[in-house]
Image (cartoon, grey):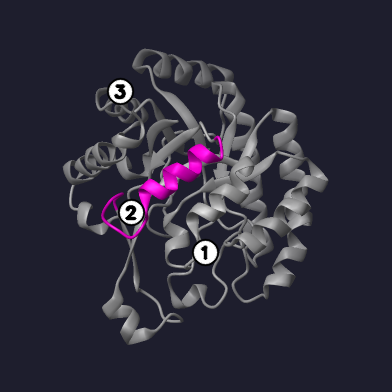
Amino acid sequence: MQLGFVSAVLHDLPLEEVLAFAADEGFPVVELMCWPPGKADRRYAGVTHLDVSDFTPARAAEVRELLRIHGVKVSGLGYYPNPLDPDPEHRGRVADHLRKLIRAAPMIGVTVVNTFIGRDPAKSMSKSLAEVADVWAPLVKEAKAAGVRLGIEHCPMLFTEDEWPGGKNLATTPAVWRELFRTFDAISPGTVGLNFDPSHLVWQFVDCGRAVREFGRHLVHVHAKDERIDRERLYEVGALGLGWHVPKLPGLGDVNWGEFFAALTDAGYSGPVCVEVEDRAYEGSLADRQRALRQSRNFLGRYFG
């Protein structure tokens, strides 16, 4: 396994400085954020460390040279929108940009594109699942042709009243994953996998180790983020309320990291594990966010030998 980080935390640094920081701090890999340039519509979105809007062979050569100079590899290209948004025009824009990521990835030697499945929060699970094949089949086929695997992250994207009750991402639990893999394996076996993040299972009370062991062959990328259950808030609003689970740095929440890494090794996973910083306690400045990465590296380093 290789320890890296998700580049969104260094949103105010250009690509070369992100790679330099990774090299200086001993991170061999980085997941690069590839949102379309423009204003973000939520926290941690809208970060563009690699602009694939018009990604030419000349630009690809420049990026490959930067990676060579700094000795850092790209674990995956990341873009986390809602491909099943109820607005057809929005869906179209998202699909078009995902295609650009899929085409850009092999140009710089990357084989993974990470994203969400998406969901219309107002629709039932069954209705949402019925839409997946129509929206995703062309993208999956294009990824297969490009030699790219799609890593689906399983955050429910349920944080605000606008996202209630279904959230904006369908791929949230083992039962849904089984249905999705049945759908995708009928299109292109092995092209779609999981970008696994233990924090999202903590607040859903899903056994993380068991999930890794069952779906280990589907893991194409891993995020390292912790989650703390705020028991006082949970008491006030109950499990159907909002705001009672808090993203934290690895080691500062309720993830059992020993069990998690034991499950990863049991499953034979040997790919990247990228720290994802969404801890508000470390957002005050660039120095705080860089410290968050160092602290996470120091904590997780015990599992990397």
Magenta extent? 249-268
- C-alpha gap between disc 1 and disc 3: 33 Å
Label 1: few (<14), some (14–19) or many (≥20) C-alpha neighbours in 10 Å: many
Front-lying residue, 296 or 102: 296
Q: Is mark 3 on a helix, strand or loop?
A: helix
Where does the image place residue 184, in percent across and percent down from the top left? 75, 48
Give the Cα distance between marks 2 and 3: 22 Å
Circle 1 sits on which residue?
A: 156
Residue 97, can we see it?
no
- Corner quadrant of residue 300: top left
Q: Name the residue under label 3.
A: 23
Q: Residue furthest bottom?
A: 236
Residue 278 circle label: 2
- For badge 1, the amino acid type reads Pro
Q: Residue at x 70, y 57 (%)?
A: 178
CB within 8 Å, label 2 to label 1:
no
Q: Residue at x 51, y 72 (%)?
A: 163
Q: Tell me the element at label 2.
A: loop
Q: Residue at x 30, y 79 (%)?
A: 233
Give how far across and how far down residue 151 sits, in percent: 58, 43
Question: Left or right: 178 with respect to 253?
Answer: right
Earlier sequence position, callout 2 versus callout 3: 3
- Residue 280 picture quarter: bottom left
Image quadrant of residue 83? bottom right
Q: Quadrant of the C terminus?
A: top left
